[in-house]
Amino acid sequence: MTVIPDVHPDWEMVIGLEVHTELRTETKLFCGCPNRFGEEPNTNICPVCLGLPGSLPVINRTAVDYAIRIGTALHCTVQSSLFHRKNYFYPDMPKDYQISQYDVPINTDGYLELPGGKRAGVERAHMEEDTGKTTHVGGGGRIHEADHSLVDYNRAGVPLVEIVGRPDLRSSEEARAYVDELRAVLVAVGASDGKMEEGSLRVDANVSVRPVGTTAFGTRCEIKNMNSLRSLGRAIDYEAARQIELLTSGGRVAQQTRHWNESDGRTTAMRSKEEANDYRYFPEPDLVPLAPWPAWISAVAASLPAMPADRRLAVAAASRMRPGSDAVITVVRLDLDRFVTAVVSAGGDGELAVKRLANEVASDIDSVGNLDEGAFVRLVAMEGKGELTTAQARTVLKDLLAEGGDPAAIASKHGFEALGADALDSLVDEVIAANGLEWARFVAGEDKLQGLLIGKIKAASGGKADLKVASALLRARRA
Amino acid sequence: VNVDRDTATSIAADVRAGTRRASDVLEEHLARIAAGDGDIHAFLTLTTEAARRQAASIDAAVAAGVDPGPLAGVPVALKDNLCTRGVPTTCSSRILEGWKPPYDATVVTRLAAAGAIAVGKTNLDEFAMGSSTENSAFGPTRNPYDHDRVPGGSSGGSAAAVSAGFAALGLGSDTGGSIRQPAALCGVVGAKPTYGVVSRYGLIAFASSLDQIGPFARNVADAALLLDVISGHDPADSTSLVASPPSATSAIGRGVEGLRVGVVSELVDAEGLSPEVVAATRDAADALAAGGAKVDEVAVPAAVYGLTAYYLIAPAEASSNLARYDGVRYGLRRPGADITEMYTETRSAGFGAEVKRRIMLGTYALSAGYYDAYYGRAQRVRTLIIRDFDAAYRSFDVLLAPTAPGEAFALGAKTADPLTMYLNDVCTIPSNLAGHPAVSVPFGTGPAGLPLGVQVLAPALGETVMFQVAAALEAAAPAPAPAPWRHSPAPSPAHEDRR
């Protein structure tokens, strides 16, 4: 939960996220080795991704394609760009430099629209190569105390796009919403599988705090090693609280890179600004400028599917709900909007469709494969016409999710013959007659008695009355 | 007149015609190596058995009526910074001790496909950093003309091998003059092609934006023949030009009638040039004028900044290119208590003094706060040099300049002062910075009677006219010093009889 309003109402968090995503290419960024996860160590390697003397990189066109897709989806300017070398020594980096992009990245200056409508700035989304993976044996898994280390270069040279967000986020909830939304965008453009737990999506958070009402940024710390949305939120909240505590007790925040420890729920210092590497960036002489031509960029833009934000707008329009409502967000996140479209184009009730999808279907999403679009359309129509009560419609939907089938058949199997209009009409009269005192008070303006009367109607009908229709009948008789 | 029956052109013609066996050609060269390389030390590794198998297969191809290619049976020496599958490739450095590349450089593959026979890997200044081949972890190479003198560098092994008749052709790499300067000092032809004409895939990088592989030969036609075999687009090298490479051989023999030749003022007036090499350059210009060329002086003002810019750009790139020699994956590893100590011990033991000097220079030049003042400015000088060359080429087809400051110097003469050594490249560096082609042709002799070289410079992709002029220079050159390999034992008659 938000630390600041609850515990430190006078302080504001400032968060900017750096998200690395592995691209789902067949082969690596600069060679033809397979880009695959989880194989025998050091099997998907060649002279290029192993950085052997004399080898040279050649860029993978599909990776560029994905980078352009990401940039376009994030409303960036896609431009002619350069690769640079980022120089530092680390055993899992075969050349002891990383080919990355520096001052002229392929995508600049875009934004990500969060479900609530806020636009979080994206400074850049650039291409770079991944490193290998080191396992330190002994010494508690830290490099400097290890007995020895094992390096697997299968991941070395896997294409990455790093999306550098502006410091526009103000709470851990916003940070989580940003990553969740970004993940949906990356999956939508086909660039990523979005799996944070497997490391194909990696998030670093730059966190600082400042007194509410001020505009200058505080000193930031960069937090690493969060491998789920939950740990991202926890790490940010912990770090903000730590910084506020420091500042309110007269201390200063040191600019640091800090490591999130999931088990004890704390961040600890990895290295300070003074210890930071001088990466000695310079233009990669083994590659030529990457200059996608306008027709390439526009072809990519034209081929993009609708982004989650656009889909939420469409669902909202079809259901007359807010694009930022939880139900709409859920329907889009779970890819259920095609059901809404089917209901609405059959003349059905979009809002009812969204509610069923966001509740019953969302809570049993693994079974959605059993749910036929036509069956769902018929179910919503039955409920909309009062042929099924809400409770009955829910039961039928659960059965549809469990084993498919026809909603009318399932309803009759359950004996859900909704009370016909005439029968309901006379039932309402009977209930009014039997509860004269309550009816009089309702007529006199005590609206809260409607619930009691409806409850009597529901009981008298054995649950078969459409309560919405019954309510309408009650109000009609009062008028 | 000496008739060199072991030029690449005549060997290939004879082998393709079936009048000479590749195996015989190879054995004659191996015999010369056996007799002479103990003193000269051009080779670090001989690939004798593989060469014999290759020669036998070429002979079998000819016998079967199959053409083995334009370099059929021609023995070639490879600088030991070119990767050769399964054959040690050392860059003359301890740091690569024991490393055998799992792949062939593109040029090595192209040579084999053209029927050439690689006889071995030649000595160089460590990682191609030097101008005398004295910076080799495995000892210096000696100049075939005078064993007390250097062959030049860094491709001194290949230059000496071709000069000494150990191979008809050689491959070197030229980052700041490393083909042309040793060619001049060893009395052979050496060319640096336009950047991007020859694939760098498999060339162990020194300074990636300057490195270019090129040919050594005992005459201009052979050098052009070799260049035509190795040039052309390679999808494995992103900096390889997609355009069809210019033909190096097509205009040889056409003379220079009507061509415009400019003598680069700044390079004949450069610091430290011997009067003999300046005179040789002027004589060369006169010879071309006599052949009908229009000759004049031309200014390339920014060329004087070339050396300074080069010694920022090349070390900067080298500091990054040589980072990978860290003991983790291949080559030398010295133990250390932790990873940092292992790196330090390995690199301290594995690299020689000149390599360390340049890594430090380059690291400094790229450091935060210094980048703009050093690397950034050096790159701007590069732009100025290209601009000045472009201006010169609006009035001239080719340019002339000395290659090296003088004839070969004594072993040890310049090792004490790196700056004196660096001055060897003052006339060759501008072409690397511009990415333009240049070829050194033997022309004249120095005070000790040793060969001098004159360069023909051309605009990017100007190899055709460059070799046209080089061939004219060669034809006009004063009677050449005797080729050293003629002093080696002649092939025995038994070989002749067996054919």
Image: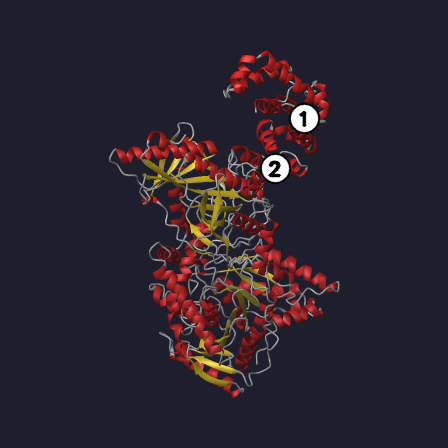
Give residue B292's quadrant in the image.
bottom right
Q: Residue furthest left?
A: A250
Q: Which mark is residue B485?
A: none
Q: Residue A393 location in percent, x, y?
A: 64, 24
- Of helix, strand and loop, which one carries label 1? helix
Tell me the chain of label 2: A
Q: Would you name the residue on which mark 1 appears?
A: A400
Q: Would you name the residue on which mark 2 appears?
A: A337
* A307 lies above or below B499: above
Q: Nearer the viewer, residue A8 or A386?
A: A386
CA separation, marks 2 and 1? 18 Å
Give residue B446's quadrant in the image.
bottom left
**Tag 2: residue type?**
Asp
- Of helix, strand and loop, which one carries label 2? helix
Q: Nearer the viewer, residue A291 or B123?
A: A291
B211 to the left or right of A15: right
Q: Which quadrant is home to the C terminus of chain A?
A: top right
Q: Earlier in the sequence, mark 2 or mark 1?
A: 2
**Tag 1: residue type?**
Leu
Q: Nearer the viewer, residue A342 or B88?
A: A342
- Residues at discs 2 and 1 in contact (Cβ within 8 Å): no
Tell me the chain of label 1: A
For the question of whether residue A154 can be seen, the reply is no
Q: Residue A249 location in percent, x, y?
A: 25, 33
Residue at 68% in and 25% down: A387
User: Count of labels shown?
Assistant: 2
Q: Residue A44 location in percent, x, y?
A: 58, 43
Q: Residue furthest top?
A: A434
Q: Residue A389 location in percent, x, y?
A: 63, 23
Neighbour tally class for label 1: few under 14, some 14-19, many 20 plus, Cα within 10 Å: many
For the question of whether residue A72 can be seen, the reply is yes
* A310 lies above or below B143: above
